[in-house]
Image (tube, rainbow, N blue to C red):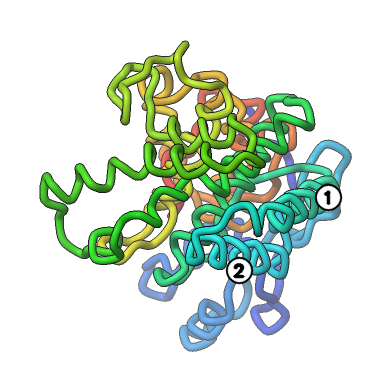
Amino acid sequence: MSPEVTAIIEVPLKYANESMILVRDIINVNGSVLVTAGTVLRQEILVSLRKHNIETIWVNDTPKLKPLNQEITEVPHLISTATRQKMIKILQNSFQRGSIAVYLPYLREAIDEVIRELSLHDHLLIYLTDIRKKSDYLYGHCVDVGVYAIVIGLAMGLVKEDIYVLGLGGMLHDYGKTTISDAILEKRGSLTLDEFAKIKTHASAGYNILRAETKVDSRIALLALQHHERPDGRGYPWGSKMEEIHPLARIVAVADVYDALTTERVYRPAIAVYEAKRIINECSSTQFDPKVVAAFNKVAVPVYIGSSVKLNNGLAGAVLRINSADPSRPVVWTRNGAINLLNNNDVDIIAVI
């Protein structure tokens, strides 16, 4: 394995900037490592180095890389904050007032806006960049599941009509939770058997509510019913197996679990994006459709430029570039140089640090 060649330079500390990437360990007069190679410089690190009388450091000479033909150098927000907040407000009004028919035109307009904004991206990548407030979890979760489902569907090459149903179905998948008290939904401790049984009724409840709405596509109701079904038959409410679960519901299932894992809740902290992706991949075939997981892997990016990562070869480093061919296998700068994981199948990221 030969690392990708990248030029490095020595610069006086006073000229160092945030976002520069160290290519050599910084060692103090006692021989202790202050900062390891691969670290992306931050203001607090620079201040600390000045206090230790460090005069020069070795860095990558192109800390802010220019876009290359087959590389992604930024991970953008999938949709604008304004669009997301608008969608949350629509769902909140619909859920709280128990009316789908009145708000369905607004939901359709919101889906159109999401598709329009997504079309502006050269690359559609899922990356959780903020932790939502616990108080808006249900509505924010529904919006994000809808958006994530659309992105996965696009990666699978679905036709526009299916994408449309997928987005609406994702946003309305938890509609049945309007029938469950907040005392149960937001309980900090463990649920009793009766409380858990009540939670599990939301899938059927959502289906019944949506199915009763004549203007709602029957497939949208089916996504609400089946988003907790699993290919191995261990899901609910019916214990359906792979061939019995609607293909679009299999997509919503992955989007739902990913967003739930990576979002802070009142009873647990958010799980790291990389860990959530690992969990989903470990459950491929048993809990999720492998085809959906494969599409999810193409768009779910557990790292971004500047992320500090640990590799299975014992090295640590920082992500320099995201490869569009496989965003989960970026170019990583280590003390031994830059390693393009796309060309080194034996090297994997095992943790984001």
Which mark identifies residue 116? 1
Residue 282 in view (yes/no): yes
Q: Is residue 252 above or below residue 117?
A: above
Residue 345, percent from left and from top: 56, 23
Quarter of image, res 15: bottom right
Distance (Cα) linking label 1 and label 2: 19 Å
Residue that appears at 76% across and 46% down: 72
The three-letter amino acid code for the residue at tag 1 is Arg
Give the mark toward the camera: 1 or 2: 2
Observer-nearest of 275 and 289: 289
Residue that appears at 66% across and 74% down: 18
Observer-nearest of 162 and 337: 162
The three-letter amino acid code for the residue at tag 2 is Lys
Q: Is residue 147 above or below residue 280?
A: below
Quarter of image, res 339: top right
Which mark identifies residue 89? 2
Which mark identifies residue 183? none
Q: Earlier in the sequence, mark 1 or mark 2?
A: 2
Observer-nearest of 314 and 207: 207
